[in-house]
Amino acid sequence: LSSVLAFRTARLLRVARTFRLVPQFRVLWMLVRGLMSAMQTLVWAMVILVGVVYAFGMLGVELMKADEEFWNEDEETRVVYNDKFRGLFPTMLTLLQITTMDTWTAAVRPMVFRRPY
C-alpha cells in the first residue's frame, strides 16, 4: 500500500512540475508558491489559537466545576453543561465554536437567562 501511495505522490509531483513549466499556469504557480510561503505563518497562528483556547478551556472547566449548584438548578442548564462543558476537550470545542460564532447561542443562551451577570 505504501509503494502505491509513493507512486501516486511521484506522479502528482511530476504533473505539478509540468504545470510550472507551461506559461499559462505561471500565475497559478505564483499563487501556490505564495500559499506555501505563508504556511509557516498560518501554522504559528494556529498554534497560538490552540494555546489560547487551551488556557481558557482549563480556566472554564475550573470555573464551571466550582459552581455546581448553578448547573443543577435547571434541567436545561444541566444538559448544556453535560454537552458543552463536562471536560477540557468539550469546553475547548465550545470555546472555538463561540470564537467562530458557529451556533454559539445554543451554548450561551440557557446560561444567560439563568444568570445574566
Image: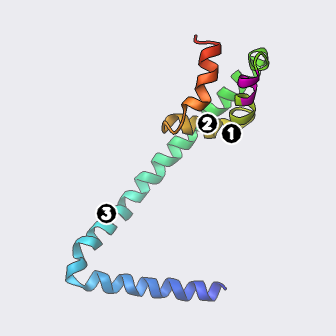
Dots 1 and 2: beta carbons under 8 Å? yes
- Which residue is found at the position 51% from the left and 83% from the top? 9
Q: Which residue bears the numbered disc 2?
A: 94
Report the residue at 64% width, 22% height from top: 110
In the picture, measured across the screen, residue 108 lies left or right of residue 68, that is: left
- Circle 1 packing at 10 Å, graded few (<14), some (14-19), many (20+), is some
Residue 34: which numbered mark, if any?
Answer: 3
Question: Mark 1 sits on what residue?
Answer: 90
Element assignment for label 3: helix
Quadrant where the N terminus sits is: bottom right
| Magenta residues (range) | 75-79
Q: Are marks 3 and 1 in contact (CB under 8 Å)?
A: no
Residue 90 position, x and y percent, is 68, 39
* Secondary structure of the residue carrying numbered label 2: helix
Q: Residue at point 20% right, 80% down? A: 24
Residue 5 lies within the magenta run: no
Indicate whether residue 77 is drawn in magenta: yes
Q: Position of residue 88 (x, y in %)?
A: 71, 37
Closer-to-camera residue (12/107): 107
Rendered view: 1 above or below 75? below
- Picture quadrant where residue 76 is located: top right
Task: Residue type at mark 2: give it.
Answer: Thr
Q: Is residue 76 left or right of residue 21?
A: right
